[in-house]
Image (tube, coloured by chain):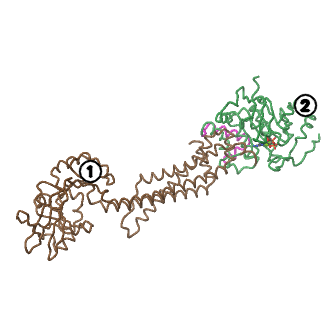
Chain colours: A brown, B green
Amino acid sequence: MKFELKVALRFMRSGKSQTLFIIVGIAIGVAVQIFLGSLITSLQGSLVDETIGNSSHITIRSEEDATTRILEAGEPGTLLLRGNASTAQKELDNWSLIVDEIREDEAVTAISPTLQGTALVRSGGTDKSVQIKGVFFEQADLIYEISSRMVEGSPVAEGNTILIGTKLATDLGLRPGGNLNLLLPNGDSVRLLVGGTFDLQNESANSSLMFMDLRRAQKLFNTGDGVTAIEVQVEDPFAVDTIADGWKQRLSGVKVEQWKELNQQLLTALSSQSSSSYTIQFFVIISITFGIASVLAVSVIQKSKEIGILKAMGTTKKSASRIFIFQGLLLGLMGSIAGIAAGILLLSVFNSAEGLTFSITYSWANVLLLAAIATAAGTLASVIPARRSANLNPMEAIKNG
Amino acid sequence: MDNILLQGENLTREYGKEIITKALNEVTLKLNKSEFSSIIGPSGCGKSTLLNLLGALDRPTRGRLLFQGRELSSMSDGELAAFRNRNIGFIFQFHHLLPEFNALENVLLPTWIGSGLADRKREEKAKELLELVGLKDRMKNPANNLSGGQQQRVSIARALINDPNLVLADEPTGNLDSDATEQVYDLLRKINKELGMSFLIVTHDRHIAEKSDRVIEMSDGRIVSDYKTADKSPDELWKRLAPHNCKFPVMENGRLVCGMEESAPAN
Ligand SMILES: Nc1ncnc2c1ncn2[C@@H]1O[C@H](COP(=O)(O)OP(=O)(O)OP(=O)(O)O)[C@@H](O)[C@H]1O
Ligand SMILES: [Mg+2]
């Protein structure tokens, strides 16, 4: 151990209550930072997850405008389905090439080529608008997690078997095993079997969405091999801008949209929330710094005789200042450690409370970063007292009793 | 000459910027090895100022200081600190010890400053020195659990730990009672004889001055006389020292003044 460190520790121990108070002060500051930071991050995480957790992060569409295909379906006396293959865009014919290309990207976690169309289902006297998503079920499932959110039936969408939203099923009076007849433009009739119903925890999806096998949808909408969109999820949803920009460069003739462009308002709300959280954290750090600085400034005066004796015995200016740098560092460090313990305790108390819709998680990287910042603040706070200690005149200090 | 330890030439120390106080005025002196010297003189005559200059705690406004032929004025602050650590032992009138440390640790402090925290060998030496000053059984005592005289003896051990060439003491018994004073001086003298290091002591006590090898009298920032006690008869010496004698100095407005004069001893 260095001699300056030993002296620093003894000085801190001799002013026990002073030391204890400032450590408790720092600990409270750090605990508040950890709690607040984790709360905001977790809140935002759950909000973002709700918004985009089960939807496409990046969607690739054709750049050209689409022609509209009329779809009429139904049989007199049964449910009538008619409509148009949605789309403001033309289908992507070369989609499998694009899929091959973006699959190379390591950030990508799911790719689902989709043919999306709207249709009307006539039930009784009213028309009901439905969204048809033609997909490869396994791939779409990675994004929409349908199989884990089934209400009735089994998660299969192949051949003529389709899955529909639970609200839509109720509205149409359908249950798994029930039928829906479609009349295709060429006059053929297709009978669709409801394989199951799902609850995607989203009102509009539950009341209008229908998953269908991609091949069946292509036949239905008569689009050949085309799809209207390629839906993609990526590892870090907040990195979509750079990923999408890269794809825009590489892929020609397509439009690359990402969720951020479509959710500007949410992002603005999140970022102002974050910045107010940062502001609070910044001022907590400022008050920690001033707290440590004032305790050490008092300490230099209290210990000026000791410093004078040490200097007379050959302590250099550098050493005399290091004694106080160490104290600042130690106060910051000890306060941080106590603050981490208090903050994590606070979080677990909060998480074990009943009636919570989400739990607060914390990242060790973040906690350690906060501790490092508080420790650095302590060290920084000691600079002025340390300089005073360095410049203290030993003759003045030892002159009188 | 080989016997010279420290040599000051025309040392002047001025304080203040607009109103200049000459605390020390063109002082020239040589200190010899193994010499036990006293500085006497009225309050404010510059004794402490001179001691601080000789101990490299302070720099002269003008003049040169040579330690065993080495020029001190050209050294940096850091070099001077290292110089003090290796060559000078200080004994102060007040604030002898660091209250945060025990007696043994206080003695070890100069070695920590000079070469890092103690190893066994230096700890043994510190214990020997504590034994020398008669405090072996008190070495684990916190510094402020010791009496004033005990504290001063610990600080003597501390001044000796790095084997300095010169021990400087500024009224080291100024706030001790007469028994403790006697003990401390007997101890200093004994160490001087046994270990052979030079001592320079500021004192108001003519008993002490009388027992020194050499007496340096100061007045108004100058050395007014400088003699070996062996060259004077005891009577003459006693008379010379009378004006400076003060067995019971008291603090008045932050400086020491004499509280009571002492009558000459009955032969
Ligand atoms: N820091 C200072 N600033 C201004 N003047 C000073 C300072 N230190 C000492 N002096 C002046 O220098 C002169 C010598 O002071 P010094 O302390 O050396 O006297 P002294 O002989 O040690 O006195 P005493 O016996 O009272 O300790 C005094 O006139 C004192 O007022
Ligand atoms: Mg003095």
Q: From the Cβ of disc 2, is ligand 1 less than 8 Å away?
A: no
Which region is colored magenta? B117-140
Q: Position of residue A199 (x, y in %)?
A: 24, 67
Q: Quadrant of the N terminus of chain B?
A: top right
Both marks 2 and 1 on one chain: no
Return the residue at label 1.
Answer: A108
Taking the spot 86% from the left edge, 33% from the top edge, the residue there is: B224
* Image quadrant assignment for residue A15: bottom right
Three-letter amino acid code at the position of disc 2: Lys
> Is residue B127 part of the magenta span, yes or no?
yes
Q: What element carries label 2?
A: loop
Mark 2 Cα shell of 10 Å, populated few (<14), some (14-19), many (≥20)? few
Q: Position of residue A120 (x, y in %)?
A: 16, 69
Q: Residue furthest left?
A: A187
Residue at the (70%, 41%) spot, across then down = B130
Instruction: Using the image as rendered, state which of residue B182 and residue B22 is in the foreground.
Output: B22
The overriding secondary structure of the stretch rendered in magenta is helix
Q: Distance between the residues labelled 2 and 1?
A: 103 Å
Answer whether labels 2 and 1 touch (C-beta < 8 Å).
Answer: no
Disc 2 marks which residue?
Answer: B232
Q: Which residue is drawn at the image coordinates 79% and 47% (left, top)?
A: B175
Which residue is at the far right?
B267
Residue A186 in the figure: left or right of residue A34 = left
Q: In which quarter of the image is ligand 2?
A: top right
> Is the residue marked 1 within 8 Å of ligand 1, measured from its CB?
no
Q: Mark 1 lies on which chain?
A: A
Residue A148: which disc?
none
Considering only vertical position in the picture, is A68 above or below A174? above
Secondary structure beneath disc 1? strand
